[in-house]
Image (tube, helix red, strand yellow):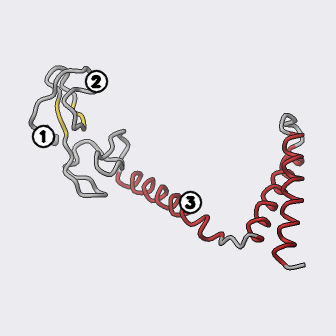
């Protein structure tokens, strides 16, 4: 028997065992240990099947790791720069702070508008106020 066949067999047995245990114990929340064992068996089974298939785990998990690193970087930048507003750049979607003239991430000019009816400043490319629904003025708001 080749190594891939052994990995495949082990993966199938452990994966199915873990899945069966998971299904049997899904409503039983008290014995956390049984749930953990079932989950571990399921994950080991998936890993072994991947090994049997010749799967390169680096290719599978690198996009996930890249996304997590990007999210952590954005969180770190937002906490360092004090970006606590809910405004996002219309171009790249990253957080911006009211009063910024340009996005720190993509460099695009930010189109701030002042509502003539309610007087609220907002980041928008639309024609209407997001707070009261009035038509917005055409000129960008001053960065105060």
Q: Residue furthest bottom?
A: 2
Which part of the image, by quadrant, shows the N terminus? bottom right
In front: label 3 or label 2: 3
Tag 2 secondary structure = loop
- The mark total stands at 3
Tell which circle, 3 or 2, labels the residue nearer the N-terminal end. Answer: 3
Where disc 3 sits, the SS reads helix
Residue reaching furthest to the left:
139
Q: Residue at x 62, y 71 (%)?
A: 58
Q: In the shown orientation, is residue 21 left or right of residue 82?
A: right
Q: Which label belongs to residue 131?
A: 2
Q: In the rendered structure, which disc, 1 or 3, sits on the residue that comes first in sequence?
A: 3
Q: Which residue is mark 1?
A: 142
Q: Residue at x 54, y 63 (%)?
A: 63
| Rendered view: 101 above or below 134 | below
**Numbered tag placed on residue 64 in the rendering:** 3
Q: Quadrant of the C terminus?
A: top left
Q: Residues within 10 Å of mark 2 (few under 14, many from 20)?
A: few
């Amino acid at each position: 028997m080749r190594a891939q066949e052994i990995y495949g067999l082990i993966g199938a047995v452990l994966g199915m065992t873990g899945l069966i245990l998971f299904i049997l114990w899904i409503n039983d929340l008290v014995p956390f240990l049984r749930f953990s064992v079932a989950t571990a068996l399921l994950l080991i089974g998936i890993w072994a099947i991947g090994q049997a298939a010749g799967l390169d785990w680096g290719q599978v998990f690198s996009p996930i790791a890249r996304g997590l690193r990007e999210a952590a970087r954005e969180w770190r930048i937002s906490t360092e720069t004090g970006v606590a507003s809910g405004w996002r750049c219309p171009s790249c979607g990253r957080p911006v702070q009211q009063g910024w003239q340009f996005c720190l991430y993509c460099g695009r000019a930010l189109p701030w508008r002042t509502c003539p009816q309610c007087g609220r400043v907002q980041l928008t490319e639309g024609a209407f106020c997001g707070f009261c629904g009035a038509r917005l003025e055409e000129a960008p708001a001053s960065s105060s």
